[in-house]
Amino acid sequence: MLKAGDVILASVQFTDTAEVKTRPAVVLFEELGNVVVAGITSNLKMKGIPLRTSEGSIKDSVIKLNYIFTISEEMVSKVLFHLGKEKKRLIFDELCKRLDGLKA
């Protein structure tokens, strides 16, 4: 069972093509076999939350909270590592900022 904060390798289809590639992502939550994730890129010029090798990443990367998608549990090939409490809190806080417009 996947947990929020797991960094995984998963097969993902890109929005601009039909191509499917294996890419890293961080699990936001899992429910009924559907896994909601945020993409991770090693392109440090992109906006997002930094993810360092000291935290378990193979190379310095960026968690892209503007690239959130749902995949099936079967698309996950492996769990690489689990984010620490502080990084998970930062992701939560940043997502809340972006979702603030939904408040009634």
Image: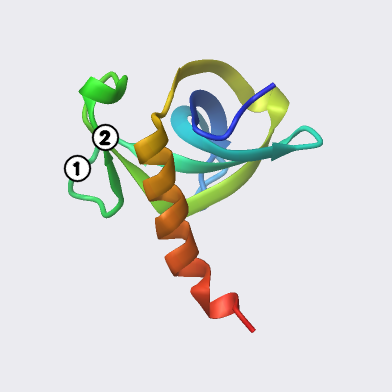
The numbered mark at residue 61 is 2
Rendered location of residue 17, percent (x, y) = 51, 47
For the residues labelled 2 and 1, the Cα–Cα distance comes to: 6 Å
Rendered location of residue 66, percent (x, y) = 43, 57
Name the kind of residue labelled 1 in the image.
Leu
Name the secondary structure under disc 1. Answer: loop
Name the secondary structure under disc 2. Answer: strand
The answer to whether 82 is drawn above or below residue 61 in the figure is above
The numbered mark at residue 102 is none
Rendered location of residue 49, percent (x, y) = 30, 47
The numbered mark at residue 44 is 1
Residue found 49% across the figure and 63% down from its top: 96
In which image quadrant can residue 2 be found?
top right
Residue found 23% across the figure and 29% down from its top: 52
CB contact under 8 Å: marks 2 and 1: yes
Residue found 55% across the figure and 15% down from its top: 78
Quarter of the rendering occupied by the C terminus: bottom right
Rendered location of residue 82, percent (x, y) = 45, 23
Name the kind of residue labelled 2 in the image.
Ser
Residue found 57% across the figure and 35% down from its top: 4
The residue most toward the right is: 32
Question: In this view of the protein, which residue sits in the foreground, 11 or 25?
Answer: 25
The answer to whether 79 is drawn above or below residue 34 in the figure is above
Quarter of the rendering occupied by the N terminus: top right
